[in-house]
Amino acid sequence: MLQSGAAGGRGCALCPLLGVLFFQGVYIVLSLEIKADAHVRGYVGENIKLKCTFKSTSSITDKLTIDWTYRSPSSSRTESIFHYQSFQYPTTVGTFRDRISWVGDVNKGDASISIINPTIKDNGTFSCAVKNPPDVYHNIPGTELTVTERGFGTMLSSVALLSILVFIPSAVVGVLLLVRMGRKSAGLKKRSKSGSKKSSIEVSADTDQEKNDCMAKLCVHCAECLDSDYEETY
């Protein structure tokens, strides 16, 4: 946002605090917007992602920094747990040592992190701060994290879902097999009623037998003809 102002920027002593820069007779409002989930719920032992996104009016450079802090519900003291500047630097001390993983991408405006193997002691407020000079003035959103044990109901629902995913395909396959077996059984019964079908060998043998019978009858008939001719001669 641009606004004209007094020459030299006189009369704006609070401009640096408000993120306003006076340049060539114009007030320039530096803008850097940060968003994070207000509430996140997770379970003990299951990695939890703390999402944080930002929009800057300036191009991303190696001067961009990201800082995540943690504050326990029973304390007013904040603890630095992650720092980023061209590379990620998770904390090496405290309760979050070796349990913070970088899952963001600054080129996409993503400053998210992940908590590995969370516990109930991790409950508290997490804050995400981003600076991308000259954009350094912004809101600092907080995320309230609640970590709990998975209840019996949650475990039961997961087991039920898994059972459904396994049972339904098995049931469908079983029904199809029963239908196929039923059709095959009905076909066999129908054949038994109409008589069994002869094999190709049996059909061939029957045909040869019929031919032999015809030849025998023909020979008998010819013999009878010869006898009758012989009798007429005499």
Image: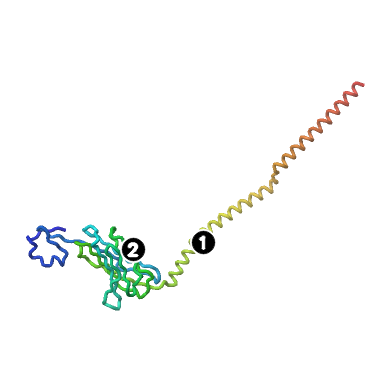
Residue extending farthest right: 234
Residue at x 53%, y 59% (from the top left corner): 170
Tag 2 or tag 1, which sits nearer the N-term? 2
Along the line of sight, the residue nearer the viewer: 120 or 172: 120
Residue extending farthest top: 233
Which amino acid type is shown beneath numbered disc 2?
Val
Which amino acid type is shown beneath numbered disc 1?
Phe
Q: Position of residue 88 (x, y in %)?
A: 30, 65
Q: Secondary structure at mark 2?
A: loop
Measured along the vertical axis of the image, is residue 21 above or below residue 217? below
Q: Position of residue 49 (x, y in %)?
A: 34, 66
Which residue in the protein does label 2 denote?
A: 103
Residue at x 28%, y 58% (from the top left corner): 107
Q: Quadrant of residue 142?
A: bottom left
Q: Nearer the viewer, mark 1 or mark 2?
A: 2
Residue at x 79%, y 32% (from the top left corner): 215
Which residue in the protein does label 1 denote?
A: 167
Q: Position of residue 185 (x, y in %)?
A: 64, 52
Cα distance, mark 1 to mark 2? Answer: 36 Å
Measured along the vertical axis of the image, is residue 166 above or below residue 151? above
Question: Quick check: 117 left or right of 228?
Answer: left
Q: Quadrant of residue 77?
A: bottom left
Q: Secondary structure at mark 1?
A: helix
Measured along the vertical axis of the image, is residue 4 above or below residue 159? above
Q: Position of residue 111 (x, y in %)?
A: 29, 63
